[in-house]
Amino acid sequence: MQNNILIHQGDLPDDVSFTGSVAIDTEAMGLVHARDRLCVVQLFSGKDSDPVHLIQIPNTKNHQAPNLVKLLINKHITKIFHYARFDVSILMYTFNIEVDNIFCTKIASRLCRTYTGKHSLKDLCKDFLGVELSKEEQTSDWGSENLTELQQLYAAKDVLYLHKIKNALQLMLERENRVATVQACFDFLPTRVKIDHLAGEQFDIFSHKST
């Protein structure tokens, strides 16, 4: 990995900006937003010469990150996630904002790579880029004041390849005539997240079951 990793406390610096698109990932203390706080937000422009930005979010109630929020709500910048449902959910929950203009590589993969059940970021990195991605640090303590070098590297790699994967998936979606369908899924994500906040991820409004 040649890209520099820059760590910021609390917010994105005033002199850092993104245009067109940005790859985003998050790390938290767990999977339950009402219990487990957001700890780190990773950002990458997609340009090989640019650094990966890691923003550590402090454990303070109602923390404000105006520069990060400004980026997240910018309708003109595409936010690229892998499994956006989790990341968008914790970002909306933490900062009480709307996030749109989303591209989710997991949803895109599941819609156009229907010949396989392998849609993890690790799978996509291997299949499209020939990159072996380690997930050993996924369950480490992201709330620690000082991130280890292994944590920093893990966090950076979670956004480093998203632009290239998006481009590859976009070609497949176009080939299979599923661009409109995947866009409708992306557009629905903020609403799906709001339903998750209200009733949990197991509440399926499309289910035939009465409960």
Image (tube, rainbow, N blue to C red):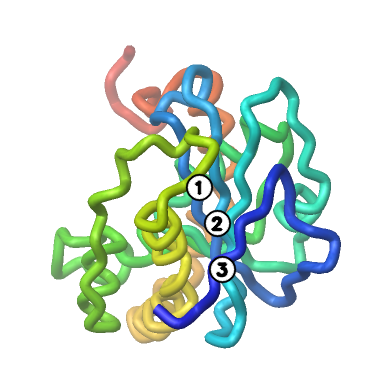
**On screen, residue 207 above or below 21:** above
Q: Position of residue 192 (x, y in %)?
A: 51, 37
SS state under label 1: strand
Whole-percent x and y of residue 1? 39, 78
In contact (CB < 8 Å): disc 2 and disc 1: yes
Q: As rendered, which of 211 and 34 lies closer to the eye?
A: 34
Viewer-closest of 128 and 187: 128
Q: Position of residue 22 (x, y in %)?
A: 61, 68
**Residue 181 visible to an observer of this rendering:** no
Query: Which of the two labelled residues, at mark 3 and mark 1, occupies the earlier sequence position?
Result: 1
For label 3, the SS is strand
Residue on which the image places disc 2: 42
**Separation of residues labelled 2 and 1 (CA atoms):** 6 Å
Left or right relative to 122: residue 7: right
Residue at 74 percent across and 76 percent down: it is: 19
Q: Position of residue 83 (x, y in %)?
A: 40, 51
**Quarter of the figure with the C terminus:** top left
The structure residue drawn at horizontal position 44% and vertical position 30%, both measured from the top left corner, is 29
| Above-or-below relation of 61 to 11 | above
Nearer to us in this view, 32 or 182 = 32
Q: Of circles 3 and 1, which is in front?
A: 3
> Does any portion of residue 18 appear in the rendered image?
yes
- Residues tagged 3 and 1 counted as in contact (Cβ below 8 A): no
Q: What amino acid is found at the position of numbered circle 3 in the picture?
A: Val
The residue wearing badge 1 is 26
According to the picture, the residue beneath numbered tag 3 turns out to be 52
Res 38 quadrant in image? top right
**Amino acid at the residue labelled 1:** Thr
Q: Earlier in the sequence, mark 2 or mark 1?
A: 1
Q: Do labels 3 and 2 touch, CB within 8 Å? A: yes
Amino acid marked by disc 2: Gln
Circle count:
3
